Image: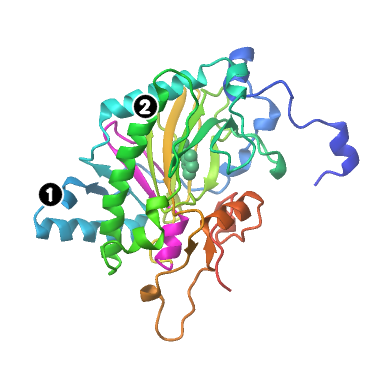
Amino acid sequence: MASAMSMKASPVHPPKITTVKALVESTGSSSIPSFYNFTPYLRDEPIAGDAEDSIPIIDISLLVSGTPEQQSQIIHQLSKACSDWGCFMVINHDVTESLTKAMIASFQEFFDLPEEEKKEFQGNHVMDPIRCGTGFNPSMNKANYWRDFLKCFAHPEFHTPNKPAGFSEIAREFSKRNREVIIILLKAISKSLGLEESYVEKAANFELGLQLLAANYYPACPEPEKAIGIPAHYDHGLLTTLVNNGVSGLQVKHNEKWFNVNIPPNVLFVQVADHLEILSNGKYKSIAHRALVNNKATRMSIALAHGPALDTVMRPAPELVGNEGDQPAYVEMTYRKFLELQQTGRLSSKFRSDTEQSKAVRAS
Ligand code: OGA
Ligand code: NI
């Protein structure tokens, strides 16, 4: 940690750069400023070969309109996907490819707005319903991430910037359709845990659940091996859905190795997040993931975090807490409190070794 004196002497961050996009467009240089260096993330980290294993695929249409046998087969597949991997690819859902394309195009238009106009939406607090910005986190005194973002609360109240034209309508439809997929999955996941179908929705008060619509913008990076888009972390909701613009970069950690995730255009990639881990008392674990950057093309991804209601106390399902005097594995807390603790770095980390961010508080 730098002393007060030396911190005063050397500004860590050039004050003029507001986004990575602006930096890239203004310099066009072949190297990156040193404050984007993030080399430690590559150390001692095995990468899986493509043929090694593959991410489970869930045909959601069979959950909705399959025979009872097909439904129970998919529930079984979901159970395996959530416990072995913590992520899966959903096919045959109702988030159409054209809607996803329109959403990506609309976010692109947002990022293309003049820097001055985007500044209007520059929130500072996690609870700001609209917040755009860049990867720099001053409180962590760490390298900048090679990523700009826009985050909007889409549920229970819907917020989006009032520009570009049409953005709000597309975002509303996109968020709604993703939410419908999640409701189907939460019912099946409840059953896969041996719980009543509406268990997770009720326990999380999902009707008032916080849904966060986030777009990540990763410009092509002249030195991709030095920078990082987003370092390893876990998402904090129940489940996250993710799509991208056909440029890869997402990796998930499975069996101590990093796997590249290539998301086909009509597929929703779904990740188990911390609050499903908490509700399931650790039976399903949130998955560590990160975003790498490349030197060829701008990557965009859209992540929707589907979380509990902010003021509902979240705890492991009593049915899943062992009956031989075992304690629940996680401390009770509202989602709001969890987010606040995570922001201020006061959440104790379960998997310190592979993540920069914190993980669910475990009961000790
Ligand atoms: C995130 C995230 C990964 C990606 O936004 O939380 O993990 O592929 N994004 O952009
Ligand atoms: Ni994430």
Image height check: is 56 above or below 298?
below
Circle 1 packing at 10 Å, graded few (<14), some (14-19), many (20+), is: few
What's drawn in magenta, residue-wise?
258-281
Residue 51 magenta-drawn?
no
Q: Quadrant of residue 247?
A: top left
Of marks 2 and 1, the one in the foreground: 2
Splitting the image into 4 quarters, where does residue 278 fall?
Answer: bottom left
Which residue lies under the disc numbered 1?
Answer: 65
Horizontal side of 52 relative to 362 (left or right) equals left
Mark 1: which amino acid? Ser
Residue 177 coordinates in the image, percent (x, y) = 30, 38
The C terminus lies in quadrant? bottom right
Nearer the observer, 247 or 275: 275
Secondary structure type for disc 1: helix
Q: Secondary structure at mark 2?
A: helix
Residue at the image position 48 percent from the left and 49 percent from the top = 235
**Which residue corresponds to mark 2?**
169
Q: In percent of the image, x 49 and y 32: which residue is there?
A: 216
Q: Position of residue 296 (x, y in %)?
A: 46, 21
Q: Is residue 163 left or right of residue 60?
A: right
